[in-house]
Image (tube, rainbow, N blue to C red):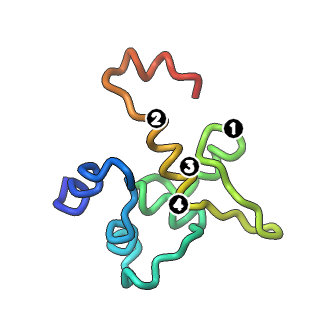
Amino acid sequence: MNNCELNVFKNHKNILSPEKIAVDLGIDRENVPSLLTDVELAKILRLSRQTPRYWRVKGIGPRFILVGSSVRYAIDDIEEYLRSNRFNSTTEAGNNDV
């Protein structure tokens, strides 16, 4: 885990800091979007590009917004999803409804 990733987890209020998003997307901090595409979400969370789409179909991922026919994810909804999926053990994670 690099220093940027470690700093993300030190700040319990904002799991996805603008700095982390900027680094992961290769953009300036000032250009960090407030709504992310599924491709950007996958890149930030280091997932397959298909995972956010799979989550939407199954209803198990972060809440999303439809803008016409385009899917977007609000940073706050992503953070809420990540916070609700933090566990201390695999036993605890296995008891999660998701």
Label 2: element kind: loop
**Residue shown at 64%/52% (left/top)?**
53
**Residue shown at 32%/21% (left/top)?**
89
Residue denoted by label 1? 58
What x and y, as percent, mark residue 11? Answer: 29, 53
Q: Earlier in the sequence, mark 4 or mark 2?
A: 4
Q: How many marks?
A: 4
Q: Earlier in the sequence, mark 2 or mark 1?
A: 1
Label 3: element kind: helix
Kind of residue at disc 4: Ile
Q: Earlier in the sequence, mark 1 or mark 3?
A: 3
Labelled disc at residue 75: 4
Labelled disc at residue 85: 2
Q: Toward the viewer: 85 or 44? A: 85
What x and y, as percent, mark residue 83? Answer: 44, 41
Residue denoted by label 3? 51
Q: Nearer the viewer, mark 2 or mark 3?
A: 2
Left or right of residue 80, residue 18 in this image:
left
Look at the image and tell me in which quarter the C terminus lies. top right
CA distance for labels 2 and 3? 16 Å
Q: Earlier in the sequence, mark 4 or mark 3?
A: 3
Label 4: element kind: helix
